[in-house]
Image (spheres, rainbow, N blue to C red):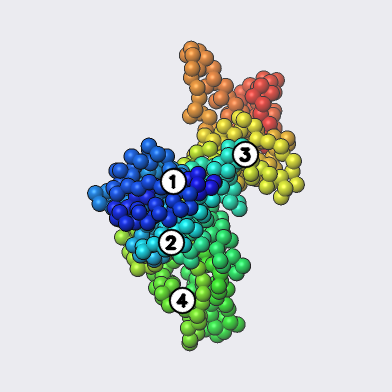
Amino acid sequence: MKLAESKVLVIDDEKEIGWLFSKILSEEGCNVSTALKGDEGIAKIKKENPVLVILDLKLPHKSGIEVLREIRSFDRELMVVVLTAYETVESAVEAMKLGAHDYLSKPVNIKKIKNLVKNALITKKEAIKTGRERDKKGCTELEEIVGQSHKIQRIFHLINKVAEHDVTVLLKGESGTGKELVAQAIHKKSQRSENPFVVIDCATLPDTLVESEIFGHEKGSFTGAHKRKIGKFEQAHQGTVFLDEIGNLSKPIQVKLLRTLQERKIERVGGKKPIPVDFRLIAATNVDLEKAIEENRFREDLFYRINVFPLPIPSLKDREGDIQKIAPHYLKRFNRILGQNVKSISSEAMDLLIRYSWPGNVRELMHVIESAVLLANDQILPEHLPLKIQEVQKGHMEFEGELKKAGRIAKEQAEKQLIQRVLKEVNWNKSRASQILKIDYKTLFNKIKEYRIREN
């Protein structure tokens, strides 16, 4: 995408800024138009269809934030660069949270304007190319994170943006949504990628060991401390600390963590001098920390220290279309790990996977596919899935047509589920199953064949 082919719209209430951008970018071959107010800018976007918008956050009548929200209501892909008054980490973070591609600080630098616009247009070109490839492949991946939904694509974008800045990230989401995978992706794309990525799982550490594990201890500092232990923060020097389920930390440990974040120094248990540490912190939680603050379970000052760049991770049920991409991804993975050769997932099985609510999110789906790969031969069928997933079809029966037909469908589904359950309980002893079901052996045999019930 060449500059000469590009329409750029500048929305800024200062005429001088609009004139400056017009002059600089017109010399580069861009077709530049300007707007002094938000509503005027929105109207020009809809009429002129620019490839890039440069938007001032401080506008009269309608703020830049409101304008950006309105843009996103009708165009989620339009490239927007935000103008901020001060070049600070906070303004960069705010710009990214609003969905901006990048930000420029005032007073504007001519060289920086040219470079940023060129890079934005290159990114737009790549996005168009990626979109076309995604339409062909139906899938976009970032490390182990797979999906094509708008929500997960937004996560990919934010990972790429925040990884460049050495700011603290707070990942929010239900258990199993892949928060650690997101943390790893941020680390791998950061300037610290060659250094350690250290995980601290606050949910599994016993209270008696938390302080020692995180900060380390000196020999003889307590009973059983037979030698010096280097804590996780020291192990992560010049790398990234991933503090998983931070909401589980006790108040005394929260105090010590807050001090570490403020001073970038740690003290080992039993130690007498502070030790400087250089790390980037990525924290994660599956609980509402603001509610925990209200209930006096989490320190408010620590919350504001870690909530610099909040990144909500969507649950699997909210990622429309992603199950169809994630399930085959794990099928390939577990074929390789388990030495299996399961070729596909049947349409009936996939339909059940799509209907299921996935309270355990991606982690639960991963375990379901792993188990199914072990049970299946050439193809994963409904009977290779857990019973709770097979049973989702009960709530989704299609009662179309005559009442008699609806009754038959319900009867067949109920029979199949009952036979499956009984056979499982008696370890596929068909004679015993026919006695419990009060049908003869031949009838049971025929129904197993009719309903395609297979032994798991």
Q: Which residue is at the front of the view, 205 or 401?
A: 401
Neighbours of disc 3 within 10 Å: few (<14), some (14-19), many (20+): few
Real-space Cα separation, disc 4 to disc 3, in angstroms: 45 Å
| Mark 4–mark 1 distance (CA, rounded to whole Å) | 48 Å
Amino acid type of the residue tagged 1 in the rendering: Asn
x then y, percent, for residue 235: 57, 73
Residue 214 x/y as whole percent: 51, 72
Who's the residue at 64% across and 32% down the image?
346
Q: Which residue is mark 2?
A: 110
Which is more toward the observer, 61 or 157?
61
Closer mark to the observer between disc 4 and disc 3: 3
Distance, label 1 to label 3, CA atoms, is 34 Å
| Residue visible at 42% across and 39% down in the picture | 49
Residue 179 in percent (x, y) is at 51, 55
Mark 2 and mark 4 in contact? Answer it, CB < 8 Å: no
The residue tagged 1 is 31
- Nearest to viewer (mark 4 / mark 1): 1
Query: Is 115 on the left-hand or right-hand side of 441?
Result: left
**Dot 2 alpha-carbon crowd within 10 angstroms: few under 14, some 14 to 19, many 20 or more:** few
Task: Answer yes or no: is residue 334 visible.
Answer: yes
